[in-house]
Image (cartoon, helix red, strand yellow):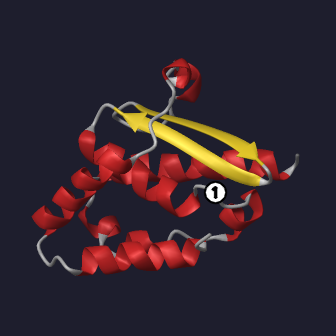
Amino acid sequence: MATIDDIQQEIIEEFSVFDDWMDRYQLIIDMSADLPLIDAGHKTDKYIIDGCQSRVWLYAECRDGRMWLTADSDAIITKGLVWLLVRIWNGQTPADILASDPYFIQEIGLSQHLSPTRSNGLLAMIRQIRLYAAAFSRL
């Protein structure tokens, strides 16, 4: 299995092809199609991430010492953003998730090009994934 850093480097390389931010946004939208969608039974208020302007559902489970994530959003760019996080952390150990830094966000320029509300939503998604990882690390 690829490491978190390996996956982040893949994402950085994929985005490096584009100089224009409209093309990068389109890539985020296109990537959203690969998101492992949350089961309809988990698409409830219990799994909505607080702090996101759009609705984002995130479900996590721990199997064999690794964390598995599924998600969905009612906003296409947000769906792509949550997919990027799921992509780097899906199948990783809770300890590795907690020890990692999602530096790809800075490297691909997301931190400079997201609106304040989308930035807050992205931080809320990261916070929720880390909360799941912290809870699973105690199991």
Q: Which amino acid does label 1 sit on?
A: Gly
Location of residue 22 by image quarter: bottom left
Residue at x-position 82% and y-position 53%: 137
Left or right, residue 16 beside residue 37: left
Q: Is residue 87 above or below residue 3?
A: above
Location of residue 12 by image quarter: bottom left
Q: Residue 15: x and y, percent?
A: 27, 74
Residue at x-position 47% and y-position 74%: 8
Left or right, residue 101 beside residue 119: right
Residue at x-position 78% and y-position 45%: 135
Q: Which residue lies furthest to the front in this view?
A: 1
Residue that numbered label 1 is attached to: 91
Q: Residue 127: x and y, percent?
A: 58, 50
Would residue 120 be seen by someone viewing this image from the given angle? no
Q: Residues within 10 Å of mark 1 (few under 14, many from 20)?
A: many
Tell me the element at label 1. Answer: loop
Would residue 16 be seen by someone viewing this image from the given angle? yes
Residue nearest the viewer, comparing 113 with 1: 1
Residue nearest the viewer, comparing 130 with 42: 42
Residue at x-position 59% and y-position 23%: 46
Q: In this view, does 93 lie above or below 71?
A: below
Q: Residue 23: x and y, percent?
A: 13, 65
Left or right, residue 73 beside residue 62: left
Q: Residue 134: x and y, percent?
A: 76, 51
Left or right, residue 116 beside residue 3: left
